Image: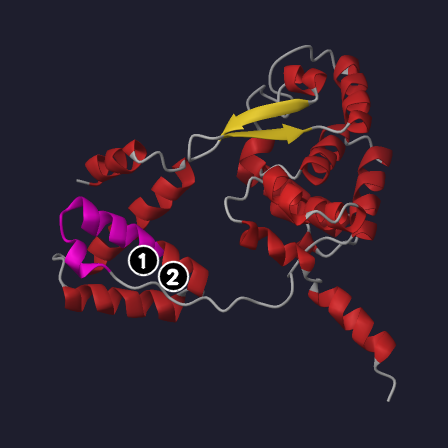
Amino acid sequence: MHKKFEDHLRKKNLANNTIRSYSTAVERYHSFYDTVNKTNLLNFKEHCVTHYKPASANIQIFGLNQYLEYVGREDLKLKSVKVQQKRYLENVISNEDYQNLKKRMKKDGRMKWYFMVWFMAATGARISELLQIKVEHVHAGHIDLCTKGGKIRRIYIPKTLVAAALEWLESQQIESGFIFRNRWGRLISREGIYQSLQKYAKEYGIDPKVVYPHSFRHRFAKNFLEKYNDIALLADLMGHENIETTRIYLRMTAGEQYSIVNKVVTW
């Protein structure tokens, strides 16, 4: 049943990570209950709300609702949990820490990681998008990717990054294909990237909470708006379907808010 459900989700052109999350939610539900009814569904929802953050609980609920639609029980669909939007950004690497991280990586000869961090912060690429970048894309100065809705998203690679990356790739005798590979020539895994970034953050004395792949995408957005205040263009560059998603970058980080409070509040 679960295999057929996953096939159903693939036909809806959902991302692989989303399919895995939804399928896991259904498996978790069935580990608790043998039958699908309103009482069991509400109890499962209560379990999710109790044990997960609202956003994570909603993933479970969305997965179950997709399953209910698949089995023809849309009448049993659950309402999602209201997520209170915070008025600040959390755990975004500062420009100072970003520059310091790059500097230390370059000094220590960790060039692959140096360029990986630079690519994420200079393009706004998600980790899944970053891993699709090839030498050919660096030469072209951009990569075109097909989004979930069948639209094409173009990620631009700035000229300064292109020049430096091509010089590095030439020194490594990498002439074509994917640029971020592991020692065995395969694409580096998401887990491998996350764990390595955490290790380097601790080694360089940077808070590990702000050193993770998506943090550099946030840094791209923050830096872009500081230099070119066009929220609509940023939404296009980030690949956001709704400009409201992009508006969060108009907000300060919690650290930035606190810094201003300390300067302003002298009474």
Asked if residue 69 is among those painted magenta in the image, a careful observer would answer yes
Give the residue displayed 60% in from the left and 44% down from the top.
Answer: 235
Q: In the rendered view, does 183 fall on the left or right side of 256?
A: left
Location of the C terminus (image quadrant)? bottom right
Name the mark on residue 57: 2
Asked if residue 63 is among those painted magenta in the image, a careful observer would answer yes
Percent coordinates x, y for residue 228 in the rendering: 77, 45
Q: Residues within 10 Å of mark 2 (few under 14, many from 20)?
A: many
Percent coordinates x, y for residue 79 in the rendering: 30, 64
Q: Is residue 212 visible?
A: no
Quarter of the figure with residue 82: bottom left
Percent coordinates x, y for residue 77 in the rendering: 22, 59
> Which residue type does callout 2 highlight?
Ala
* Colour mapping: secondary structure
> Which residue type does callout 1 highlight?
Ile
Q: Tell me whether the residue at label 2 lies in contact with that at label 1, contact meaning CB atoms closer than 8 angstroms.
A: yes
Name the mark on residue 61: 1
Percent coordinates x, y for residue 106 in the rendering: 83, 34
In the depicted structure, whether residue 82 falls above or below residue 215: below
Give the residue displayed 14% in from the left and 53% down from the top.
Answer: 73
Give the Cα distance between marks 2 and 1: 6 Å
Give the magenta part as a residue range: 60-77
